[in-house]
Image (spheres, rainbow, N blue to C red):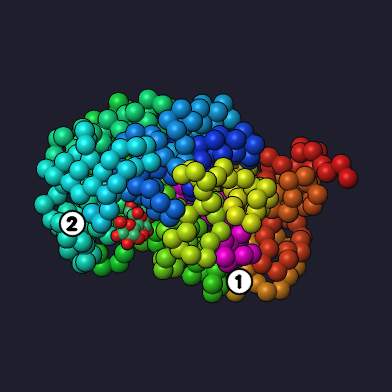
């Protein structure tokens, strides 16, 4: 898991396709105050032109000049976020360069084409297989051939490893604290270990994007030598429980990566679009409940995904003049701003308060409502039913009056825990409740109105 930031925890927000200027403003405005420790940003390197979001995943060079901002803006973002207590995780695309189906001028003015990235890579720096991956059952092909025609880097070579390490070292020099390794499944684990060994900080946090699939030869567990791995099966399981019933959700991590090595999320930019079997913002109330569970339960290192609304899977965020327009949560017609939804912000604070306290006092109704404690630090109820839930819960919390941090940021709704640790509450249909010792009536400002 990403290292805990003192006094804050380690929850991340993934602000997909947000510009550096917008991320910086958001660190100050919401990410820092809400208690996030990290923000994952989209790939910062120079990329192919065009209006689709996925141009970010076709590198042209490692210059930090992109539709999301300039090098100076990136550096300023790292500093501003740092001042707000939030560290940066950069999405790094190191398996490949641009597709073999295009050539031209990149976002930073560099020219590119097939086997041609002047001053950086030439024909010898790409793997000899020049056809597309078709068989995910073939390890060699998955790692040496082209992913959707993207020119596949010869990551086995010293030169390519050095160039990738130089790029990552540049980001480390700017203050980046961690990396998402895009398309890690397509790079041999030993190549990644060799690259990581060349970093100025070889113990910097890495999380590998390895989409684990039953029956495939390459699995997320192979990559634990150079960092954590994303656990896509967690997101699929989560969707399965919430789509059906959640009484058995305690088993969500059976057979998955160990909790301390698993990067988990409700969805990401790929799974919300394609057929990966996860939830997305389009699920409405259940999506909120999925995020409440992600943050409330004690499995994995969580990332809250925050992107933009779409109908066309390829459509990029609104652009002008070759740049993405700065995201704004005031523009809710475009940006989901999941990271600042009251329920989710409340659960980030919950997670930071309960820390490593174990799951205790499990309750479920055998159907679609569950509740659990986190030791004597907090208690959560999740009601995935189409009807309200009226129930008395047994907690291990000290007696007192607590704020329901899912219901409001202002302690508008309180829950009274009695001397024996019990409370009674009514939870709305497809609703949740969470209380913790860091938010008791009187601790947080109440709504003046
Ligand atoms: C990833 N992880 O392994 C990214 O999370 C995922 O978003 C990337 O695919 C992929 N791997 C490569 O980094 C995305 C889009 C693709 C897109 C690709 C390159 O899902 O649709 O491919 O980025 O931009 C597009 C076209 C393809 C075309 C290719 C090359 O859709 O039809 O062959 O570009 O021109
Ligand atoms: Ca490869």
Q: Provide residue 123's location: percent of width, then percent of height.
A: 13, 44
Looking at the image, residue 373 sits to the left or right of residue 389; the answer is: left
- Whether residue 431 is visible: yes
Sooner in the amino-acid sequence: mark 2 or mark 1: 2
Q: Position of residue 32 (x, y in %)?
A: 60, 35
**Does the Cβ of the disc 2 residue fall within 8 Å of ligand 2?**
yes
Disc 2 target residue: 145
Residue 368: mark in rendering: 1
Q: Is residue 420 above or below residue 131?
A: above
- Quadrant housing the C terminus: top right
Along the viewing direction, whichever of 156 and 22 lies nearer the viewer: 22
Name the one closer to the observer, 46 or 181: 46
Expressed as whole percent of the image width and height from the top left, the position of residue 54 reads 39, 53
Residue at figure coordinates x 34%, y 28% from the top left? 170
Quick one: SS at disc 1?
loop
| Dominant SS type (magenta) | helix
């Amino acid at each position: 898991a990403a290292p805990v930031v003192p006094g804050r925890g380690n929850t991340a927000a993934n602000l997909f396709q947000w510009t550096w200027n917008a991320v910086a403003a958001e660190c100050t405005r919401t990410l820092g105050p809400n208690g996030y420790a990290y923000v994952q940003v989209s790939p910062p390197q120079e990329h192919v032109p065009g209006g689709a979001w996925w141009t970010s995943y076709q590198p042209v060079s490692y210059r930090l000049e992109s539709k999301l901002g300039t090098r100076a803006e990136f550096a300023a973002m790292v500093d501003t976020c740092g001042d707000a207590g939030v560290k940066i995780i950069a999405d790094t695309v190191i398996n490949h360069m641009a597709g073999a189906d295009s050539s031209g001028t990149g976002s930073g003015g560099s020219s590119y084409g097939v086997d041609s990235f002047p001053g950086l890579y030439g024909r010898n720096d790409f793997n000899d297989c020049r056809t597309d991956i078709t068989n995910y059952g073939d390890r060699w092909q998955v790692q040496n051939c082209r992913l959707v025609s993207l020119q596949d880097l010869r990551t086995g070579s010293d030169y390519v490893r050095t160039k990738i390490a130089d790029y990552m070292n540049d980001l480390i020099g700017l203050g980046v604290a961690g990396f998402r390794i895009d398309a890690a499944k397509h790079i041999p684990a030993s190549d990644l270990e060799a690259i990581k060994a060349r970093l100025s900080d070889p113990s910097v946090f890495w999380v590998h994007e390895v989409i684990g699939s039953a029956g495939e030869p390459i699995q997320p567990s192979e990559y634990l030598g150079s960092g954590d791995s994303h656990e896509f099966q967690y997101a699929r399981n989560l969707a399965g429980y919430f789509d059906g019933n959640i009484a058995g959700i305690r088993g969500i991590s059976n057979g998955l990566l160990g909790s301390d090595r698993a990067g988990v999320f409700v969805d990401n930019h790929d799974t919300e679009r394609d057929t990966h079997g996860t939830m997305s913002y389009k699920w409405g109330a259940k999506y909120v409940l999925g995020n409440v569970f992600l943050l409330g339960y004690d499995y994995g290192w969580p990332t809250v995904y925050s992107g933009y609304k779409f109908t066309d899977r390829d459509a990029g965020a609104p652009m002008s003049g070759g740049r993405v327009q700065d995201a704004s949560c005031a523009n809710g017609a475009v940006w989901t701003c999941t990271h600042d939804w009251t329920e989710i912000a409340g659960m980030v604070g919950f997670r930071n308060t309960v820390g490593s306290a174990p799951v205790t006092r499990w309750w479920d109704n055998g159907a679609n409502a569950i509740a659990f404690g986190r030791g004597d630090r907090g208690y959560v109820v999740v009601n995935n039913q189409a009807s309200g839930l009226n129930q008395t819960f047994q907690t291990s919390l000290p007696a007192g009056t607590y704020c329901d941090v899912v219901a409001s940021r202002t302690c508008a709704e309180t829950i009274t825990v009695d001397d024996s640790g019990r409370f009674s509450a009514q939870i709305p249909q497809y609703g949740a409740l969470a209380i913790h010792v860091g938010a008791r009536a009187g601790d947080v400002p109440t709504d003046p109105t």
